[in-house]
Every structure is written in C-alpha cells, then in structure tokens.
Image (tube, rainbow, N blue to C red):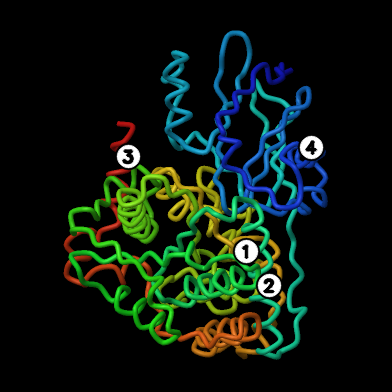
Amino acid sequence: MHMQATIERLVDLTDRAGNQFFNVSAEEALAAVGSGDPARVRAIDGQFALVHKDGRTVRMARSLGRPLRYFIAKRQEGPCLIVAERIDAIHNFLREEGLAGQFHPSYTRMVPAHHVVEIALLGCPDPNPTYTRFFTPGRNRLPADLDAIGAAYIGALSEECRRWLDSFDSAEPIGVLFSGGIDSGSVFLVLYHLLLSRGESPARLKAFTLSVDGVGADAEQARRFLAELKLDLFLETIEVPAAELDFAQAIRVLEDYKPLDVQAAAVGLALCRGIRARYPDWRHLVDGDGGDENLKDYPIEENPELTIRSVLNNLMLYQEGWGVHAMKHSLTYSGGQSRGHVRSYAPGRSCGFHGFSPYTMPNVIEVAEGIPFIELTEWDHHRLYALKGEIVRRGVAAVTGLTMPTFEKRRFQHGAALPETFSARFPADPTVYRQAFAEMYA
C-alpha cells in the first residue's frame, strides 16, 4: 500500500501586484479560485494568475494574459509545492533551499489557461492534477452578418479596454505596441475613441513602432495607417540597431524555444527596451496579441498538423492547442496561445511594464467563438483569411465611427527589419533554438 503525504509547504512566488481585476477585488478573485467553482472563476474579468491552498487541496487558475507554473520538491519534512510565473524563479528557489539536484526545466508544469488545476495530495506517488474548465464559450451563436459580428466583436474589445482604463489613474500615459496591422490598429483606435468619449486627453496615448537600422515595413505601414486618419502625431518610432535582435537573449526571457515565438519575443524585447530607455517611468503598454487566434488567421498551409476542418471544428484550437487531455498537450508548456502568449508578456514584464492584451480576454474570445466560421467560409482557406480584416474594419467603424485602414497580413517580427537583416539575426534551423534553451540549465 502506498503512503501519501499531504502538502506540507506551499511557496507562492507569483507577483500578485501583476494581476488585474476589473469587476472583483483580489480577495474575491482568490476566493473564487479556492472554491473550485468554474462559474465563479469564469466571472472574474481581468488578467490573473492565482493559487489558493485550503488544507490539503491546492487550486490554481490563470487567464491567457499571465503565465503560472508549479513544481513539486521532495523534502524530508514533506513535499513542497512551488508556484511561480517563471522557470528560473523555481530554479533559484530550489538552489537556495539546497534542492537544485531535483530540478530540470521539463519537470515544471504550466497551468493551462481557462482551467482550474487542483492538486489534492502530494507525496509518493505524486497524483496527477485534475483539470476543470472554467471557460467554455458557445460556438456558432452569431448570425452570418459581418456588420453584426464586427459590432459585437469590437464592442466586446471596447468594453474590456474601458474597464482597463478605469483601473488606473487617468493621468498615466498609455503606449500601444503598434505595427499598423489589424490587431494593434484596432486597439489603438478603440483606445483613442474611448479617451475622447470619456473627456480625457488623447495626448496620453502613443503608438510605439519598432524600426531596426532605421528601416522595416512596419514603420512605413504604421505611418500610413495613422496618416490616413490624420493621427500621425501619435506615432513614435523606436529605432534600434540590428544587434539588439538577440535570439539567445530572447530565449532566456521567454523560457521557450519555438522559433516563431522566440523571434516575436526578440523583436518585442528590443521595442520594450527602447521605450524604457526613452521613458524611465512609463508603466502601461497594450498590444493586439490574440487577434489572430480569435479569428483563426494563421496560414494553415505552414503547419502540416492542421487542416481547415481541424481549425474550424475544434474549440479555441489556436488559444489552447489540442486540449489538456490530448496526447499532444505539453505538460511543461500547455498549448496554443496558452503557451505562446509569453512572447508578449515576458518582454514587457522584464522591462518593468504592466502589459494588457485585450484580445485575450474571455469576453472577447467568447464573441469570436460565436462566429459561424463554417457558414461564412464554406471550408475555403482564402475566405477564412479575408474574414478578419472585414470583421474588424466593420466593427471599428460601428464602435468608433472611424474607417480603419487595412493592409496585407505580416508577422510582427517580419515587419521590424529588412528580410536580409532578419535572416542574419535569426537561425532558420529550429534545433539551434532548442539547443540555446537546453544550455540555460546545462
């Protein structure tokens, strides 16, 4: 008969000040997670990573906007559960406790977004945690009317941005990580409209765009976007040398090795460092990450594991991957944007910013999952790819009255530098990224 030991020690290394709650207090949010009731956790509006211990039961939950990891350490006095945002925080704690010999980065576990993770007993043997989904958006609920869909989608985005603006001082400046693309462009215009409608000065708003070696397609696209709306006075270009695009450094900040995420993190890190150097006291940054996932706007042809049927038939595939019970689900990283959002979160966090990604909010995702994609596309890739621009453009017009310019889709990392610069700074071989990550704890 196996003897099982209860959790003797919980070490919570998370930064509770990094949580953002728009409709409840921090205490109420923590109590909701502690209850294990998925409806109460779903009712939390904000970006959060929470851990609650009640006797021998530990419950953890997070939104897409914040990472949350845990590790079980064995001690003579009994098992210890360490919870943190980062792998290196767990490693540093174990080293200080003389327990570093138990550590390997693959032994850490990521709490998957949109689930309450419950651990009841720890010891010999360690039981598997249980996963209870707290966010299950209804699918195909909206009419096949692009105007109605756009108004609902951008309306939900606007409401989350409004609540975010209510959460801090109206004198504080706001920076949008801006490329002039559909997602960052719509976030900028919604915030601009909200500030005007609230009677607040839009001068507190800036659109920060990265330019590597003084060139890059995004800088020109950003200028054109804002110039068309006579809003180009809000544009601020951050120029950095190509040497600032350091993939190995990005891997250390990101704590992951997937090439596309590393590249995005490297570009984001260069932009955030440039902003911080120019504005030592700036706090709030907002981005458009999550927009592609919501409207399923990734080239299916580039991923041999995907078909248009798998993309359109699976709930939140791009946000969560194949799901917590799937063979392909990574315990160390989870899947989809639940894994990949660290590419946006970690660079800003490492530079001392408080980031906000309104497209990752469940209330916005819920509208997106209600879109009847199959009816609108009839399983056609090109119709799917064209859908996002139409929905967002119409929605921005409905909510703000502004006509948003739209341009051809381009990844964030590809627009910051010339193609030859990008190729010189980022290896094409994925194993190089894996090796750089492995060397961190060699």
Q: CA distance from mark 1 to mark 4?
A: 25 Å
Marks 2/4 in contact by CB < 8 Å: the verdict is no
Question: What number is the disc on residue 369?
Answer: 2
Quadrant in which residue 72 is drawn: top right
Q: Residues within 10 Å of mark 2 (few under 14, many from 20)?
A: many
Disc 3: CA contacts within 10 A as few (<14), some (14-19) or many (>=20): few
SS for callout 4: helix
Residue behind mark 4: 31
- N-terminal of the pair, mark 4 or mark 3, is 4
Callout 2: SS: helix
Residue shown at the point (49%, 34%) measured from the top left = 107
Name the foreground residue: 18 vs 248: 18
Residue 279 vs residue 293, the one in the foreground: 279
Report x, y in % for residue 117: 69, 41
Query: Comparing marks 4 and 3, which lies closer to the viewer?
Result: 4
Residue labelled with disc 3: 438
Q: Disc 1 marks which residue?
A: 161
Q: CA distance from mark 2 to mark 4?
A: 28 Å
* Residue under the point 36% across and 50% down: 279
Of label 3 and label 1, which has the lower sequence position?
1
Measure the alpha-carbon separation of dots 3 and 1.
Answer: 39 Å
Instruction: Give coordinates of residue 308: x percent, y percent.
Output: 55, 79
| Circle nearer the viewer, 3 or 1 | 1
Q: Tell whether 441 sits left or right of 144.
A: left
In x, y percent, where is residue 335?
A: 54, 55
Mark 1 or mark 2: which is in front?
1
